[in-house]
Image (cartoon, coloured by chain):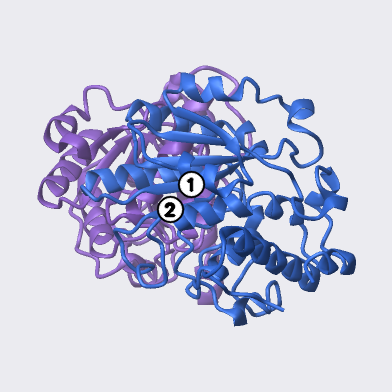
Chain colours: A purple, B blue
Amino acid sequence: MREALVDLILTHCKSDLDSLFMTGDLGFSVVEPLQCALGDRFINAGVAEQNMMTMAAALADTGYVPYVYSIAPFVTARCYEQIRNDVCYHKRPVIIVGVGAGLSYGSLGPSHHSLEDAALLATLPGMRVLSPANAAELAEVHRLTLASPGPTYIRVSRESGRPFDVPQFSKFDEAAHRVADGSDICIVGTGPAVTTALDARTLLAERGISACVVSVPVLAPFPAPGLKRCLPGAVPVLSIFEGYVGGPLELGLRRLLMEEGTSRAYRDIAIGLTYPKQVGSTEFLRHSFGIDADAAAAVASEMLGQ
Amino acid sequence: MLYRNQSGSTESRCRKIRHTIVEMSYAAKSAHLGSSLSCVEILDAMVATSNLRPDTVHSPTRDRIVVSKGHAAMAYYAVLHAWGMIEDRHIEVYLSNGTSLWGHVTRTGDVPAIDFSTGSLGHGLGYATGLALGQRLRRHSGRVFCLLSDGECDEGSVWEAALFAGHHKLSNLTAVVDYNKIQSIGTTAEVLDLEPFGAKWSSFRWDVKGCDGHDSDALTSSLMVTDAPKIVLADTVKGKGIARIENTVASHYRPATGDDRKEFE
């Protein structure tokens, strides 16, 4: 999805001279078109993410809307206090772009996995946490961001994600939509987990189970109104998040379902608070953590007593 | 008793600023008295050198001042008060519930002269660097000043900003270290020795000046623009102006006493 992201940013920055792009010295073979097109509005801040984030807040103070790009943990956990104090407290319209959502960087190791980023940033007042599943969702949440500038984190997977049509959302808290229909159970995913949910749906269909899949490309502000609109009535709900348990999707869904007051079953699949024990690809790690399509199909079957 | 007086000598203005700090610290039982008293002349010289004034405060192209040692809030509030950019009514209720001035420099709607909120050390120089870069990209002539504490230079983020500003030759950026040589619970020499301090900045391609941080004329001269980012290592005395607390670690924590107030009567 990096290429789609860079295309979006390039198109926007070419037409809006108040935008600029900062990188923490990453993006080889992807960011070069930005470097060519933006001149001094392309800023390689060096391998210094704390300073990059604080400078982004300051550049926003001088009227710019900066994109701040790096691998997800480097542009979130590494500089969390700079996001907290300099960007969020000052309400600066900085667009943080973290590449490598969840387990995207698989065998590169735990330093490159990003499993707590969404939860960390969702705790900050005013921060929008965006988690698109594919290029179409990315384009839509990017459009929403530009329409309403503010502190924003876009969590982007390395993978392209399964393509599907995406409606235009009127605002962030409407950003949830049904990407596949079904009548027995509803699987809710965000980011790369939407593709996992669609794969689980295929596996469930082979067992005679009809699963609906809902994608949630915005985790904060949690799109409760949008979800209420597209969750089918009365069926069990299973959510999948490629990150640690207790993430914003699980918390938001639990609250929504409690407020709904129904007794429908709810389960969440996410990664327990543990580190991987063996080297592995993204797919290997998803399987070993129990968050792949096989695991989702198994949990869904169990919820339905099958 | 509070003073606002831009007339008279710089020396008398700085004495009155110290008096305001002591009154604030006494009334609010506020710590960081020594840290505030050491940077009075520095902050006063920054405002005097800049074009930050009551009639320019809302201009996006004006000079900017970033107080990175946010614990010296009383000093900056008292200096802004002396220069007519904080009202008496805010100073008089410092740290009271429901008011505007926090214990570390914090931007609120009531004080537009405050550009940036600090308190966690190591953020201000990066912010000042970003402002200086933004001013340059905008082709604005505004300058950016930044006050650092010496202990703050333990933070790696200070040196990230220093590396960036030096590399990009941000000559519109001028930082001053309040070099009182006492940090939170020990001297800088004991905790993490900064020396050779000037050589460190010089190796990061900054123009380095040293001066007496309580000599307003020397400070003003040191703040002149050159063709590289500039660092002024201003030798100061923690707790300056109250002999019984000068050069003490305790002055970082101890609020002003009744006896301290008498020094300014």
In the picture as drawn, the residue positioned furthest to the bottom comes out as: B89
Asked if residue B202 is positioned above or below residue A192 in the image, the reply reads: above
- Residue type at mark 1 is Thr
- Please give the residue where the numbered disc 2 appears in the rendered image: B49
Q: Can residue A191 be seen?
A: no
10 Å crowding of disc 2: few (<14), some (14-19), many (20+):
some
Residue at (24, 70) in percent of width and height? A170
Asked if residue A22 is positioned above or below residue A212 in the image, the reply reads: above
- The mark tally for this picture is 2
Say which element carries label 2: helix
Q: Position of residue B133 (x, y in %)?
A: 32, 42
Which mark is drawn over residue B220? 1
Check chain identity for marks 2 and 1: say if they share one.
yes
Q: Position of residue A289 (x, y in %)?
A: 54, 32
CB of mark 2 within 8 Å of CB of mark 1?
A: yes
Q: Name the chain letter of the residue that bears numbered label 1.
A: B
Q: Position of residue A176 (x, y in %)?
A: 33, 62
Residue at (53, 47) in percent of width and height? B217
Identify which residue, B140 or A296, lies in the foreground: B140
Asked if residue A173 is positioned above or below residue A69 in the image, the reply reads: below
Say which element carries label 1: helix
Quadrant where the N terminus of chain A lies?
Answer: top left
Q: Is residue B134 left or right of residue A257?
A: left
Residue at (33, 53) in percent of width and height? A60
Mark positioned earlier in the residue sequence (2 or 1) = 2
Q: Is residue A162 left or right of residue B238?
A: left
Q: Can residue B119 be seen?
A: yes
